[in-house]
Amino acid sequence: MSYDLVIRNARCATASDVFDADIGIIDGRIVALGAQLAAGKTEIDAAGCYVLPGGVDGHCHLDQPMNDGSKMADDFETGTRSAACGGTTTVIPFACQIKGDTLRAAVEDYHRRAEGKATIDYAFHLIVSDPTQAVLEEELPALIREGYTSFKIYMTYDDLKLDDRQILDVLSVARAEGAMVMVHAENTDCIAWLTERLVKAGNTAPRFHADSRPMLVEREATHRAIALAELVDVPILIVHVSGREAVEQIRWAQSLGLQIHAETCPQYLFLTSSNLDATEHDGLHGAKCICSPPPRDKANQEVIWQALAGGVFRVFSSDHAPFRYEGTDGKKVGGCHASFAEIPNGIPGLETRLPLLFSAGVLDGRIDINQFVALTSTNAAKTYGLYPRKGTIAVGADADLVIWDTQTPRTIRNADLHHDVDYTPYEGIAVRAWPAITLSRGEVVWRDGEYLGKPGMGRFLPCDKPWAGPR
Ligand code: URP
Ligand code: ZN
Ligand code: ZN
Protein backbone atom coordinates (compact mmCIF):
# COMPACT_ATOMS: atom_id res chain seq x y z
CA MET A 1 0.00 0.00 0.00
CA SER A 2 1.35 3.43 -0.88
CA TYR A 3 0.33 6.17 1.51
CA ASP A 4 -0.14 9.77 0.49
CA LEU A 5 1.33 10.79 3.82
CA VAL A 6 2.89 9.00 6.76
CA ILE A 7 3.32 10.72 10.11
CA ARG A 8 6.14 8.85 11.82
CA ASN A 9 6.81 8.30 15.52
CA ALA A 10 3.62 9.96 16.68
CA ARG A 11 2.68 9.90 20.35
CA CYS A 12 -1.06 9.79 19.69
CA ALA A 13 -3.64 10.70 22.31
CA THR A 14 -7.37 10.18 22.01
CA ALA A 15 -10.08 10.77 24.60
CA SER A 16 -9.26 7.38 26.12
CA ASP A 17 -5.74 6.26 25.15
CA VAL A 18 -2.16 7.26 24.55
CA PHE A 19 -0.20 5.12 22.08
CA ASP A 20 2.85 5.37 19.84
CA ALA A 21 2.30 4.76 16.15
CA ASP A 22 2.99 5.79 12.60
CA ILE A 23 -0.14 7.18 10.96
CA GLY A 24 -0.81 6.25 7.33
CA ILE A 25 -3.09 8.54 5.33
CA ILE A 26 -4.73 8.06 1.93
CA ASP A 27 -7.26 10.44 0.35
CA GLY A 28 -7.54 12.49 3.52
CA ARG A 29 -8.41 9.56 5.78
CA ILE A 30 -6.44 7.58 8.32
CA VAL A 31 -6.00 4.09 6.82
CA ALA A 32 -3.32 2.60 9.07
CA LEU A 33 -1.95 2.96 12.57
CA GLY A 34 1.07 0.84 13.39
CA ALA A 35 4.80 0.42 13.70
CA GLN A 36 7.11 0.95 10.72
CA LEU A 37 4.48 1.61 8.10
CA ALA A 38 5.63 1.51 4.46
CA ALA A 39 6.89 4.71 2.87
CA GLY A 40 4.51 7.54 2.08
CA LYS A 41 4.71 9.97 -0.84
CA THR A 42 5.35 12.53 1.87
CA GLU A 43 6.42 11.99 5.43
CA ILE A 44 6.40 14.03 8.60
CA ASP A 45 8.49 13.06 11.62
CA ALA A 46 6.56 13.77 14.81
CA ALA A 47 9.16 12.30 17.19
CA GLY A 48 8.89 13.79 20.65
CA CYS A 49 5.53 15.41 19.95
CA TYR A 50 1.96 14.68 20.86
CA VAL A 51 -0.27 14.12 17.84
CA LEU A 52 -3.90 14.81 18.71
CA PRO A 53 -7.20 14.91 16.83
CA GLY A 54 -7.78 18.40 15.46
CA GLY A 55 -10.00 20.56 17.61
CA VAL A 56 -13.75 20.61 17.02
CA ASP A 57 -15.07 24.00 18.05
CA GLY A 58 -18.75 23.41 18.67
CA HIS A 59 -19.56 27.01 19.52
CA CYS A 60 -18.33 29.89 17.40
CA HIS A 61 -19.99 32.69 15.45
CA LEU A 62 -18.82 33.56 11.93
CA ASP A 63 -20.38 36.12 9.62
CA GLN A 64 -23.62 35.96 11.57
CA PRO A 65 -25.96 38.79 10.54
CA MET A 66 -26.42 41.39 13.30
CA ASN A 67 -29.34 43.76 13.73
CA ASP A 68 -27.69 46.61 15.69
CA GLY A 69 -25.47 48.00 12.92
CA SER A 70 -22.47 45.95 13.99
CA LYS A 71 -20.75 43.39 11.80
CA MET A 72 -18.82 40.30 12.75
CA ALA A 73 -15.16 40.78 11.90
CA ASP A 74 -14.61 37.17 10.83
CA ASP A 75 -16.25 35.42 7.95
CA PHE A 76 -15.74 31.79 6.97
CA GLU A 77 -12.39 32.62 5.38
CA THR A 78 -10.71 34.51 8.20
CA GLY A 79 -12.45 32.56 10.93
CA THR A 80 -11.45 29.14 9.65
CA ARG A 81 -7.93 30.40 8.86
CA SER A 82 -7.57 31.50 12.43
CA ALA A 83 -9.03 28.24 13.71
CA ALA A 84 -6.57 26.17 11.66
CA CYS A 85 -3.58 28.15 12.92
CA GLY A 86 -4.68 27.37 16.48
CA GLY A 87 -5.22 23.64 15.88
CA THR A 88 -8.97 23.53 15.24
CA THR A 89 -10.01 21.54 12.18
CA THR A 90 -13.81 21.61 12.42
CA VAL A 91 -16.05 24.54 13.32
CA ILE A 92 -19.77 24.60 13.95
CA PRO A 93 -21.11 28.16 13.71
CA PHE A 94 -24.77 29.16 13.70
CA ALA A 95 -27.33 29.68 10.94
CA CYS A 96 -29.49 32.16 12.79
CA GLN A 97 -33.20 32.51 12.10
CA ILE A 98 -34.31 36.13 11.94
CA LYS A 99 -37.70 36.62 13.59
CA GLY A 100 -40.34 36.71 10.87
CA ASP A 101 -38.18 34.71 8.45
CA THR A 102 -38.05 30.98 7.94
CA LEU A 103 -35.33 28.72 9.27
CA ARG A 104 -34.75 27.51 5.73
CA ALA A 105 -33.92 31.08 4.64
CA ALA A 106 -31.29 31.28 7.39
CA VAL A 107 -29.72 28.00 6.28
CA GLU A 108 -29.65 28.99 2.61
CA ASP A 109 -28.17 32.40 3.43
CA TYR A 110 -25.53 30.79 5.64
CA HIS A 111 -24.48 28.35 2.93
CA ARG A 112 -24.00 31.31 0.59
CA ARG A 113 -21.82 32.99 3.21
CA ALA A 114 -19.69 29.86 3.67
CA GLU A 115 -19.42 28.72 0.04
CA GLY A 116 -15.84 28.59 -1.21
CA LYS A 117 -14.43 30.32 1.83
CA ALA A 118 -13.64 27.78 4.53
CA THR A 119 -10.18 26.26 4.95
CA ILE A 120 -11.38 23.54 7.31
CA ASP A 121 -14.56 21.49 7.46
CA TYR A 122 -17.69 22.97 8.96
CA ALA A 123 -21.20 22.06 10.02
CA PHE A 124 -24.07 24.34 11.04
CA HIS A 125 -26.06 24.62 14.22
CA LEU A 126 -29.38 26.40 13.83
CA ILE A 127 -30.60 29.24 16.06
CA VAL A 128 -34.37 29.01 16.51
CA SER A 129 -35.73 32.46 17.34
CA ASP A 130 -39.26 32.23 15.92
CA PRO A 131 -40.84 28.83 16.57
CA THR A 132 -43.98 29.24 14.53
CA GLN A 133 -46.25 26.28 13.90
CA ALA A 134 -44.65 25.82 10.49
CA VAL A 135 -41.19 25.81 12.05
CA LEU A 136 -42.17 23.33 14.74
CA GLU A 137 -44.17 20.97 12.58
CA GLU A 138 -42.34 21.12 9.26
CA GLU A 139 -39.14 23.11 8.91
CA LEU A 140 -37.26 22.08 12.02
CA PRO A 141 -37.98 18.33 11.73
CA ALA A 142 -37.06 18.44 8.02
CA LEU A 143 -33.80 20.32 8.65
CA ILE A 144 -32.83 17.96 11.46
CA ARG A 145 -33.31 15.02 9.08
CA GLU A 146 -31.16 16.83 6.48
CA GLY A 147 -28.18 17.02 8.86
CA TYR A 148 -28.74 20.19 10.89
CA THR A 149 -29.12 18.17 14.05
CA SER A 150 -28.40 20.72 16.77
CA PHE A 151 -29.82 24.12 17.54
CA LYS A 152 -29.37 26.91 20.02
CA ILE A 153 -32.11 28.71 21.87
CA TYR A 154 -31.80 31.91 23.87
CA MET A 155 -33.50 32.87 27.12
CA THR A 156 -32.39 36.49 26.64
CA TYR A 157 -31.73 39.09 23.88
CA ASP A 158 -34.90 40.72 22.52
CA ASP A 159 -34.36 39.55 18.95
CA LEU A 160 -33.66 35.93 19.87
CA LYS A 161 -35.30 35.00 23.16
CA LEU A 162 -37.97 32.36 23.61
CA ASP A 163 -40.39 32.22 26.52
CA ASP A 164 -40.86 29.05 28.57
CA ARG A 165 -43.83 27.86 26.54
CA GLN A 166 -41.86 28.25 23.31
CA ILE A 167 -38.91 26.46 24.87
CA LEU A 168 -41.13 23.52 25.76
CA ASP A 169 -42.34 23.41 22.17
CA VAL A 170 -38.86 23.33 20.63
CA LEU A 171 -37.60 20.85 23.21
CA SER A 172 -40.45 18.55 22.21
CA VAL A 173 -39.30 18.67 18.59
CA ALA A 174 -35.74 17.86 19.71
CA ARG A 175 -37.07 14.88 21.68
CA ALA A 176 -39.09 13.57 18.77
CA GLU A 177 -36.22 13.96 16.31
CA GLY A 178 -33.14 13.18 18.45
CA ALA A 179 -31.61 16.66 18.09
CA MET A 180 -29.32 18.42 20.57
CA VAL A 181 -30.48 21.73 22.05
CA MET A 182 -27.93 24.27 23.26
CA VAL A 183 -29.33 26.74 25.76
CA HIS A 184 -28.15 30.28 26.46
CA ALA A 185 -29.36 30.55 30.05
CA GLU A 186 -29.77 34.05 31.46
CA ASN A 187 -32.95 35.57 32.91
CA THR A 188 -33.95 38.28 30.47
CA ASP A 189 -36.26 40.30 32.73
CA CYS A 190 -33.69 40.51 35.50
CA ILE A 191 -31.11 41.78 32.99
CA ALA A 192 -33.53 44.37 31.57
CA TRP A 193 -34.53 45.56 35.05
CA LEU A 194 -30.95 45.86 36.26
CA THR A 195 -29.79 47.52 33.04
CA GLU A 196 -32.50 50.15 33.23
CA ARG A 197 -31.55 51.04 36.81
CA LEU A 198 -27.82 51.17 36.03
CA VAL A 199 -28.29 53.37 32.97
CA LYS A 200 -30.70 55.71 34.82
CA ALA A 201 -28.07 56.16 37.52
CA GLY A 202 -25.45 57.01 34.89
CA ASN A 203 -23.56 53.77 35.44
CA THR A 204 -22.90 53.04 31.79
CA ALA A 205 -19.18 52.18 31.61
CA PRO A 206 -18.27 48.68 30.33
CA ARG A 207 -17.66 47.37 33.84
CA PHE A 208 -21.37 47.76 34.64
CA HIS A 209 -22.08 45.02 32.09
CA ALA A 210 -21.08 42.56 34.83
CA ASP A 211 -23.46 44.22 37.31
CA SER A 212 -26.31 43.90 34.84
CA ARG A 213 -25.82 40.12 34.64
CA PRO A 214 -24.89 38.84 38.11
CA MET A 215 -24.57 35.13 38.70
CA LEU A 216 -28.09 34.66 40.00
CA VAL A 217 -29.39 35.72 36.57
CA GLU A 218 -27.54 32.76 35.09
CA ARG A 219 -28.34 30.45 38.01
CA GLU A 220 -32.09 31.02 37.77
CA ALA A 221 -32.21 30.50 34.01
CA THR A 222 -29.98 27.42 34.24
CA HIS A 223 -32.30 25.91 36.83
CA ARG A 224 -35.34 26.73 34.69
CA ALA A 225 -33.77 25.26 31.54
CA ILE A 226 -33.01 22.08 33.47
CA ALA A 227 -36.60 21.89 34.73
CA LEU A 228 -38.03 22.41 31.24
CA ALA A 229 -35.75 19.72 29.81
CA GLU A 230 -36.72 17.37 32.65
CA LEU A 231 -40.39 17.97 31.92
CA VAL A 232 -39.95 17.12 28.26
CA ASP A 233 -37.41 14.36 29.04
CA VAL A 234 -34.81 15.52 26.55
CA PRO A 235 -31.04 16.09 26.80
CA ILE A 236 -29.81 19.69 26.59
CA LEU A 237 -26.44 21.37 26.69
CA ILE A 238 -26.07 24.58 28.71
CA VAL A 239 -23.56 26.77 26.88
CA HIS A 240 -20.93 29.20 28.17
CA VAL A 241 -21.22 28.43 31.89
CA SER A 242 -19.38 31.13 33.82
CA GLY A 243 -19.13 30.23 37.50
CA ARG A 244 -20.16 28.56 40.73
CA GLU A 245 -23.90 29.14 40.82
CA ALA A 246 -24.63 27.65 37.39
CA VAL A 247 -22.15 24.83 38.01
CA GLU A 248 -24.04 23.92 41.19
CA GLN A 249 -27.30 23.67 39.27
CA ILE A 250 -25.73 21.48 36.60
CA ARG A 251 -24.02 19.23 39.14
CA TRP A 252 -27.30 18.80 40.97
CA ALA A 253 -29.13 17.87 37.75
CA GLN A 254 -26.39 15.44 36.75
CA SER A 255 -26.49 13.85 40.21
CA LEU A 256 -30.17 13.07 39.58
CA GLY A 257 -29.26 11.32 36.37
CA LEU A 258 -30.72 14.00 34.10
CA GLN A 259 -29.06 14.34 30.68
CA ILE A 260 -27.81 17.87 31.30
CA HIS A 261 -24.59 18.58 29.44
CA ALA A 262 -22.53 21.71 29.86
CA GLU A 263 -19.96 23.82 28.07
CA THR A 264 -17.47 26.36 29.32
CA CYS A 265 -15.12 28.66 27.45
CA PRO A 266 -11.66 30.27 27.82
CA GLN A 267 -13.08 33.57 29.06
CA TYR A 268 -14.25 31.92 32.27
CA LEU A 269 -10.77 30.53 33.00
CA PHE A 270 -8.55 33.38 31.85
CA LEU A 271 -10.55 36.62 32.31
CA THR A 272 -12.32 38.21 35.27
CA SER A 273 -14.82 41.05 35.54
CA SER A 274 -11.90 43.36 36.32
CA ASN A 275 -10.98 43.07 32.63
CA LEU A 276 -14.18 45.01 31.92
CA ASP A 277 -12.76 47.88 33.96
CA ALA A 278 -9.75 48.43 31.68
CA THR A 279 -9.42 52.10 30.73
CA GLU A 280 -5.88 52.23 29.25
CA HIS A 281 -6.63 54.22 26.11
CA ASP A 282 -10.17 55.38 26.54
CA GLY A 283 -13.16 54.73 28.74
CA LEU A 284 -14.48 51.98 26.50
CA HIS A 285 -11.46 49.70 26.65
CA GLY A 286 -13.24 47.17 28.85
CA ALA A 287 -15.63 46.60 25.93
CA LYS A 288 -13.00 44.25 24.54
CA CYS A 289 -14.01 41.72 27.18
CA ILE A 290 -17.78 42.21 27.13
CA CYS A 291 -19.46 38.88 26.59
CA SER A 292 -22.44 37.15 28.16
CA PRO A 293 -22.48 35.71 30.71
CA PRO A 294 -19.66 38.03 31.83
CA PRO A 295 -16.36 36.73 33.21
CA ARG A 296 -16.60 36.45 37.02
CA ASP A 297 -13.77 36.51 39.60
CA LYS A 298 -10.72 34.40 40.49
CA ALA A 299 -12.69 32.16 42.86
CA ASN A 300 -15.14 31.37 40.07
CA GLN A 301 -12.29 30.64 37.66
CA GLU A 302 -11.18 28.02 40.17
CA VAL A 303 -14.69 26.53 40.32
CA ILE A 304 -14.68 26.24 36.53
CA TRP A 305 -11.26 24.57 36.56
CA GLN A 306 -12.45 22.05 39.13
CA ALA A 307 -15.63 21.34 37.20
CA LEU A 308 -13.58 20.83 34.02
CA ALA A 309 -11.26 18.40 35.79
CA GLY A 310 -14.16 16.68 37.57
CA GLY A 311 -16.22 15.91 34.50
CA VAL A 312 -19.10 18.39 34.90
CA PHE A 313 -18.30 19.91 31.51
CA ARG A 314 -18.62 17.93 28.32
CA VAL A 315 -17.14 20.52 25.96
CA PHE A 316 -14.73 23.44 26.01
CA SER A 317 -15.56 25.83 23.15
CA SER A 318 -14.39 29.29 22.15
CA ASP A 319 -17.74 31.11 21.76
CA HIS A 320 -15.73 33.15 19.24
CA ALA A 321 -17.95 36.17 18.55
CA PRO A 322 -15.65 38.58 16.75
CA PHE A 323 -16.17 42.36 16.83
CA ARG A 324 -13.46 44.92 16.11
CA TYR A 325 -12.66 47.43 18.81
CA GLU A 326 -11.85 50.37 16.52
CA GLY A 327 -14.22 51.56 13.81
CA THR A 328 -17.93 52.04 13.86
CA ASP A 329 -19.21 48.55 13.13
CA GLY A 330 -17.83 46.68 16.14
CA LYS A 331 -17.62 47.34 19.85
CA LYS A 332 -18.06 51.09 19.20
CA VAL A 333 -21.20 50.77 17.09
CA GLY A 334 -23.02 52.91 19.67
CA GLY A 335 -20.26 55.53 19.64
CA CYS A 336 -17.19 56.14 21.80
CA HIS A 337 -19.27 56.97 24.85
CA ALA A 338 -21.84 54.22 24.43
CA SER A 339 -23.49 52.60 27.38
CA PHE A 340 -22.46 48.99 28.08
CA ALA A 341 -25.95 48.00 26.95
CA GLU A 342 -25.16 49.16 23.39
CA ILE A 343 -21.89 47.26 23.07
CA PRO A 344 -22.11 44.04 21.02
CA ASN A 345 -21.63 40.98 23.22
CA GLY A 346 -18.88 38.55 22.39
CA ILE A 347 -15.13 38.19 22.14
CA PRO A 348 -12.70 36.40 19.80
CA GLY A 349 -11.02 33.14 20.81
CA LEU A 350 -10.97 30.53 18.02
CA GLU A 351 -7.20 30.50 17.61
CA THR A 352 -6.23 30.73 21.26
CA ARG A 353 -8.69 28.16 22.70
CA LEU A 354 -6.48 25.09 22.41
CA PRO A 355 -3.07 26.62 23.29
CA LEU A 356 -4.55 28.22 26.41
CA LEU A 357 -6.10 24.98 27.65
CA PHE A 358 -3.13 22.81 26.68
CA SER A 359 -0.79 25.09 28.61
CA ALA A 360 -2.77 25.94 31.71
CA GLY A 361 -4.74 22.69 31.73
CA VAL A 362 -2.48 19.86 30.61
CA LEU A 363 1.04 21.25 31.13
CA ASP A 364 0.15 22.81 34.47
CA GLY A 365 -1.36 19.49 35.60
CA ARG A 366 -5.03 20.42 36.01
CA ILE A 367 -6.36 17.96 33.42
CA ASP A 368 -4.73 15.07 31.61
CA ILE A 369 -4.15 14.76 27.90
CA ASN A 370 -7.17 12.46 27.40
CA GLN A 371 -9.45 14.98 29.09
CA PHE A 372 -8.00 17.68 26.86
CA VAL A 373 -8.85 15.69 23.73
CA ALA A 374 -12.32 14.85 25.04
CA LEU A 375 -13.16 18.43 25.99
CA THR A 376 -11.80 20.11 22.88
CA SER A 377 -12.56 17.59 20.16
CA THR A 378 -14.13 14.17 20.79
CA ASN A 379 -17.09 15.21 22.89
CA ALA A 380 -18.09 18.02 20.54
CA ALA A 381 -17.92 15.56 17.63
CA LYS A 382 -20.11 13.12 19.57
CA THR A 383 -22.53 15.71 20.90
CA TYR A 384 -23.18 17.18 17.46
CA GLY A 385 -23.20 14.02 15.36
CA LEU A 386 -19.78 14.11 13.70
CA TYR A 387 -18.10 11.20 15.49
CA PRO A 388 -16.13 9.06 14.56
CA ARG A 389 -15.40 10.89 11.32
CA LYS A 390 -14.17 13.80 13.44
CA GLY A 391 -12.77 13.94 16.96
CA THR A 392 -10.52 10.90 17.12
CA ILE A 393 -7.46 9.15 15.73
CA ALA A 394 -8.67 5.87 14.30
CA VAL A 395 -8.64 3.95 11.04
CA GLY A 396 -11.43 5.41 8.90
CA ALA A 397 -11.45 8.82 10.60
CA ASP A 398 -10.62 11.97 8.67
CA ALA A 399 -6.93 12.85 8.96
CA ASP A 400 -7.61 16.02 10.92
CA LEU A 401 -4.54 16.02 13.13
CA VAL A 402 -2.42 18.41 15.12
CA ILE A 403 1.25 17.90 15.93
CA TRP A 404 1.89 19.90 19.08
CA ASP A 405 5.00 21.86 19.97
CA THR A 406 5.25 21.97 23.75
CA GLN A 407 8.89 23.04 23.87
CA THR A 408 8.64 26.66 22.73
CA PRO A 409 7.30 29.23 25.19
CA ARG A 410 5.25 31.97 23.53
CA THR A 411 3.33 35.04 24.52
CA ILE A 412 -0.07 35.58 22.92
CA ARG A 413 0.03 38.71 20.77
CA ASN A 414 -2.79 39.78 18.50
CA ALA A 415 -0.20 40.69 15.88
CA ASP A 416 0.59 36.97 15.56
CA LEU A 417 -3.01 35.79 15.23
CA HIS A 418 -4.91 35.19 12.00
CA HIS A 419 -8.43 36.37 12.74
CA ASP A 420 -9.65 39.73 11.45
CA VAL A 421 -10.21 41.22 14.89
CA ASP A 422 -7.97 44.09 16.01
CA TYR A 423 -7.38 42.71 19.49
CA THR A 424 -7.31 39.56 21.56
CA PRO A 425 -8.57 39.56 25.14
CA TYR A 426 -5.68 37.20 25.92
CA GLU A 427 -2.89 39.62 24.89
CA GLY A 428 0.25 39.04 26.96
CA ILE A 429 -0.69 35.61 28.36
CA ALA A 430 2.21 33.14 28.24
CA VAL A 431 1.58 29.71 26.72
CA ARG A 432 3.85 26.69 26.35
CA ALA A 433 1.93 24.83 23.65
CA TRP A 434 1.06 25.72 20.08
CA PRO A 435 0.39 23.61 17.00
CA ALA A 436 3.57 22.98 15.02
CA ILE A 437 1.50 21.44 12.21
CA THR A 438 -2.25 21.31 11.59
CA LEU A 439 -3.59 18.86 9.00
CA SER A 440 -7.09 19.10 7.57
CA ARG A 441 -8.06 15.84 5.86
CA GLY A 442 -4.38 15.10 5.34
CA GLU A 443 -3.49 18.55 3.92
CA VAL A 444 -1.07 20.74 5.82
CA VAL A 445 -2.85 24.02 6.59
CA TRP A 446 -0.44 25.37 9.23
CA ARG A 447 3.22 24.58 9.60
CA ASP A 448 5.92 26.23 11.71
CA GLY A 449 4.21 29.58 11.86
CA GLU A 450 3.02 29.67 8.27
CA TYR A 451 -0.59 29.46 7.16
CA LEU A 452 -0.79 27.12 4.15
CA GLY A 453 -4.53 26.64 3.81
CA LYS A 454 -6.71 27.93 1.01
CA PRO A 455 -10.29 29.14 1.02
CA GLY A 456 -12.55 26.45 -0.37
CA MET A 457 -10.58 23.47 1.01
CA GLY A 458 -13.14 23.04 3.79
CA ARG A 459 -16.32 21.05 3.15
CA PHE A 460 -19.77 21.25 4.66
CA LEU A 461 -20.58 18.35 6.98
CA PRO A 462 -24.16 17.18 7.46
CA CYS A 463 -24.44 15.83 11.01
CA ASP A 464 -25.92 12.58 12.28
CA LYS A 465 -28.57 12.68 14.96
CA PRO A 466 -26.56 12.88 18.17
CA TRP A 467 -28.79 10.76 20.35
CA ALA A 468 -31.21 7.94 19.78
CA GLY A 469 -34.42 9.84 20.49
CA PRO A 470 -37.05 8.89 23.04
CA ARG A 471 -36.71 5.64 24.94
O1 URP B 1 -21.49 37.30 24.54
C1 URP B 1 -21.61 36.33 23.83
N1 URP B 1 -21.50 35.13 24.34
N2 URP B 1 -21.84 36.51 22.53
C2 URP B 1 -22.01 35.55 21.56
C3 URP B 1 -23.41 35.13 21.42
C4 URP B 1 -23.77 34.10 22.43
O2 URP B 1 -24.69 34.32 23.19
O3 URP B 1 -23.14 33.05 22.48
ZN1 ZN C 1 -25.06 32.46 24.03
ZN1 ZN D 1 -22.06 32.15 21.33
Image (spheres, grey):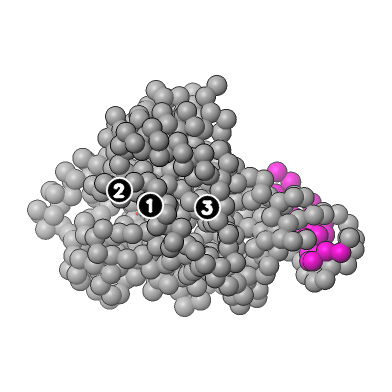
Separation (CA) of disc 3 from disc 2? 21 Å
Q: Residues within 10 Å of mark 3 (few under 14, many from 20)?
A: many
Q: Amino acid at mark 3?
A: Ala
- Part of the protein shown in magenta: 2-25
Image coordinates of residue 56 in percent, x first then y, are: 57, 53
- Assign the N terminus to one quadrant of the image: bottom right
Task: Return the residue at label 3.
Answer: 123
Task: Return the residue at label 1.
Answer: 106
Horizontal side of residue 27 vs 358, given as left or right = right
Query: Can residue 247 be seen?
Result: no
If you read the primary sequence from the N terminus, does the residue marked by circle 3 or circle 1 appear first? 1
Q: Secondary structure at mark 1?
A: helix
Q: Amino acid at mark 2?
A: Asp
Q: Residues within 10 Å of mark 1 (few under 14, many from 20)?
A: many
The residue lying at 38 percent from left, 68 percent from top is: 73
Task: Return the residue at label 2.
Answer: 101
Q: Is residue 251 above or below residue 447?
A: above
Image coordinates of residue 91 in percent, x first then y, are: 52, 56
Would residue 230 be counted in the magenta stretch? no
Horizontal side of residue 402 vs 72, given as left or right = right
The residue lying at 56 percent from left, 45 percent from top is: 463
Q: Residues within 10 Å of mark 2 (few under 14, many from 20)?
A: few
Q: How many marks?
A: 3
If you read the primary sequence from the N terminus, does the residue marked by circle 3 or circle 2 appear first? 2
